[in-house]
Image (cartoon, rainbow, N blue to C red):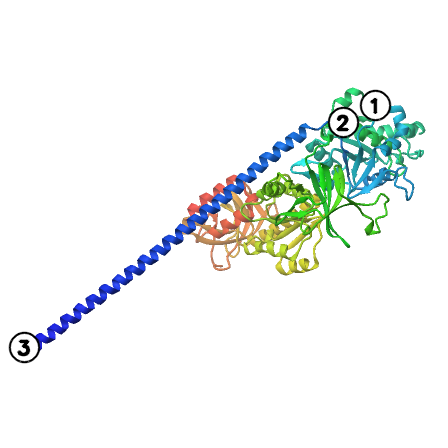
Amino acid sequence: RMQKLSGKDDDDEDLIEKEKQAEKERLRQLGLKRAEQDRIEAERLAKMEAEQEETNKEAQLIAYKREEGRRKREEQEKKNLAARTRDDLRCPIVVIMGHVDTGKTTLLDKIRKTNVQEGEAGGITQQIGATYFEKKTLESQTAKLNATEGFNITVPGMLIIDTPGHESFTNLRSRGSSLCDVAILVIDLMHGLEQQTIESLTMLKKRGVPFVVALNKADRCYAWKTCKDSPIRDALKDQPEGTIQEFRSRTADIKVQLMEQGVNSNLYWEMGDDDWENSDFIPLVPTSGVTGEGIQDVLLLLCQMGQKKVWKQLMWCANLQCTVLEVKAIDGLGMTVDVLVVNGFLREGDRAVFCTLDGPIVAEIRGLLTPPPSREMRVKSEYIHHKEIKGALGVKVIGNGLEKVMAGTPVMVIGPDDEEEDIKAEVMSDLTNLEDKLSTDKRGVMVQASTLGALEALLQFLREETNPPIPVSAIGIGTIHKRDVTKISIMNEKGCPEFATILAFDVGIERDARDHAEDMNVRIFTADIIYHLFDQFTRFMEDLSEKRRQEAAEVAVFPSIIKILPQHVFNQKDPIIVGVEVVEGILKVGTPLCVPALGGLDVGKVTSIESNGREQETARKGSSIAVKIANESNPNITYGRQFDASHSLYSTLTRASIDALKENFKDKLENEDWRLVVKLKKVFNII
């Protein structure tokens, strides 16, 4: 038996030993596995670090190359600027500005059509987005006037932008500088300065652009004798005395109005050399867009201004200065981009960089087109192809993938020595600067405009000239699509339904976008004038605030402390009618009253307030009035039993009522009223 037992113990010991060995082996295997895993993880981390280092190196290299490219480009640009001469001038670029209905378009048409018989080109060629006048045409058009003036025209021609008005002025900018050299500000002689005239004046002064004032509709003076297309002084000599007097008094009025805007002006032939040199004097030229008097004077004056005042910026420079005027589809050519080349060259085959909302795109220029010299634009195949374009000139560019290019943005060309990344960053600089200024908390409306310049003007207006500023969270250029509506509809989810709004300036809206906006509860305000857009939005915000106030009126309780006048108790119970004095704050109809001294006894709600027999909604500190107090929950509450004149009555405030006050009635309470709110918070133990 003893043997059996010892044999069993040996077996058990063997078993335990085996299990120990097995456990050791398992742990050893586990250790090996762990070591392998650690090795793989270490390798992975080392690889990731190496890759990260490589990426950082690449990023640094790209940044270095870009910086180097920028330095080289700026050096070259400086050299090119230094190489300019007064002998090689380019055409001045002219924009016509003014209020609506002052006759800008009529005047422009008259300038373009002067002395040009039907069907004959006559040296005035219609270009993309601009009308080009050759030097000899300028000379022949101003010949009659120049016979007396004796001015030598040295500019090689003139480029007048076709679309008059603000838009083209704001768009004519490239990388921060204005491309407009001189401007014509049209003022209606009959009406004087108007809203947009003043806006135009501000813009011109801000950008420092010299301008001529055309006092248009001079032919509307009483008994005006038409002297077709003649210089204005010749026309004035033929007018009767009464007409001259009317003309003089109207001109004097406009001079005063201009002076109110801080602009000194004079009829240009009455300006001495001193006024010309003293650059703050603005020449006035009476004109008629209908019969053509004074057009010669305007043209000659623009040439004089170009040569006398802005000749430094008219010196042609090899640095490419080019801006997009419009993007449009043309049958047989696909998407084309109309650009204005101010300085430098554009050549067929150049790799050009354009700006889009999705980032820069590089496209090869497949063709440079200008319209034929005659104005027949109906036959599409008649475009003239060019191998090279020298500024200043308007031209149509053909290339691939230009659908998303934005109007008002710069165009640059990647030269053999240029660094592509640098050129891309430079082209995008205007847009990146704009995006940096957007609302940082991502709460705000969406702004959509036709071009970058218009967008910039609109954003500046919303940020600086509106009170309070309207926050903007997203921007876009061109037609409004369904995706834009979806993007801004997120404001409804963020709890800011008022910002689920698109302010559309001078752009179209797709039909499905409009339908989608209704479904998503997004408002789209459209206008062609910035002010109108602002007015629409402000009106909407005011209505919304009013609606919110009405909703909050149920919850909001204005702070007040009132003292009962014991000699004026008219009814003690259901309803209580007593005379009171407002000791502090504002008492409104609907205010719930209580007595904190009696453990917050609920006295009831004020249902009406009377003063001198007249009902009123509110009573401020110091007023003595009669109030009617009703208590639906406890109609038996009686003056003289539960409370009396020794107890002051307080507005019953709660956390919700204070929040409603802050949100919707902030402007209705004075500082001392807010101090009373703080005092009552302690009374009612509101945290």
Q: In what element is the residue under mark 2? A: loop
Q: Is residue 41 above or below residue 354?
A: below
Q: Is residue 466 visible?
A: no
Image spot of residue 248 (x, y percent) = 86, 28
The residue sitting at the left extreme is 2
Residue 87: mark: 2
Q: Kindly identify which residue carries mark 3.
A: 2
Q: Which residue is mark 1?
A: 270
Q: Where residue 208 appears, x then y in whole percent?
A: 70, 31
Q: Secondary structure at mark 1?
A: helix
Give the number of the mark in front: 2 or 1: 2
Give the crowd class for mark 2: few <14, some 14-19, many >=20 residues within 10 Å.
few
Residue 602 visible: yes
Q: Secondary structure at mark 3?
A: helix
Amino acid type, callout 2: Asp
Which of 525/608 is in front? Answer: 525
Q: Amino acid at mark 3?
A: Met
